[in-house]
Amino acid sequence: MACVSVPSSPALHFSLSSSHRNLHPSSFSSSLGSHCPLSSNTAPFTLSASSDKLLAKWRTSVSFFTSFIGKKGKSTGSLKEELFEAISPLDRGAEASPEDQEMVDQIARQLEAANSVKEPLKSDLLNGKWELLYTTSRSILQPQRPKFLRPNGKIYQAINADTLRAQNMETWPYFNQVTANLVPINERRVAVRFDTFKIFGLIPIKAPGRGRGELEITYLDEEIRISRGDKGNLFILKMVDPSYRVPV
C-alpha cells in the first residue's frame, strides 16, 4: 500500500589493483627491469602475435571476473547497512537532493535484485507494523511546508496479508490514520482501496472514491521492506511490531 498522508498535515568488495588490471607488454619489461635487469647479451623481450591474443583474452576474462564480483560480491546484510547509512541523514527523504535520491534508489535496486521472497503476499514476514524510514512521496513528506508543520513524529504502515487490510498511522503532531482494503493483482502487487480516515486519530471520515492506488512489494525480509507505488514513489520501511493487527 502506498503510504498516504491526510492533508494537514563500504561493503566487502574484491577487485584487482590497477597495476595488475592494466597490464601491457611494456609493463612486463619495466617490471622485470626493476627486479632483474637484463644484461647486455640478453635478447630483447618481445611478445609474439599469439601472445598478444592470449593477453587480450586474459584481459577480457579479468574484466568479466572483476565485474561479476563487483555485482555479486555484496551480501544483503551489507547492502542493508549501506542503505540505512544513506537514508539516515535525509529526514525520511524530505532533505534528499536528486543525487541522494538516485543513490538510495540504486542501493534499493540491488536489494530488490537479491530478493528471495518471490510471493510476499503469501509470506508471514509481511504481517505487522512497519516504520517508514524513507520515501520519495511528496504527499507524505510535505517538503513545501515549514518543517514545524510537517509530520515530525514517526510514521507507520501496518499490513495483514491474511485479512488483506492495511493502515497508515502518523504520530506527532497530527496523529492522522487511514485504513484500506487490499486487492491482489499478482503475487507481489496490490490495488489499494482506502475506506476510512481518522483526523487527529479520533474523527472518522469516509474516504472519497478517488482514494485508491497500487503498491508493489519489491523486497521483503524479517527486518526491511521495500515497496514501489504506481506513481513511481519509493518506500523503505523497517519492521517494528510483527504482532500488530490492522482493524477489520
Image: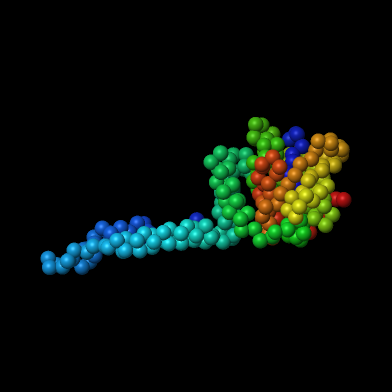
Which percent across, then down, holds residue 64?
46, 59
Residue 42 lies, with reference to residue 168, above or below; the image says below
Q: Is residue 52 visible?
A: yes
Left or right relative to 31: residue 219: right
Q: Nearer the viewer, residue 213 or 235?
A: 213
Which percent across, then down, holds residue 232?
66, 41
Residue shown at the point (67%, 42%) measured from the top left: 233
Residue shown at the point (46%, 61%) measured from the top left: 65
Q: Nearer the viewer, residue 82 or 47?
A: 47
Residue shown at the point (55%, 54%) measured from the top left: 82
The number of callouts visible is: 0
Left or right relative to 92: residue 10: left
Left or right relative to 246: residue 58: left
Residue shown at the point (75%, 47%) measured from the top left: 1
Which percent across, then down, holds residue 4?
74, 41
Which percent across, then down, holds residue 169?
77, 45
Q: Is residue 16 visible?
A: no
Res 126 quadrant in image: bottom right
Residue 8 lies, with reference to residue 124, above or below; the image says above
- Of all residues, the one furthest to the front in this rendering is 49
Q: How is the image coloured?
A: rainbow
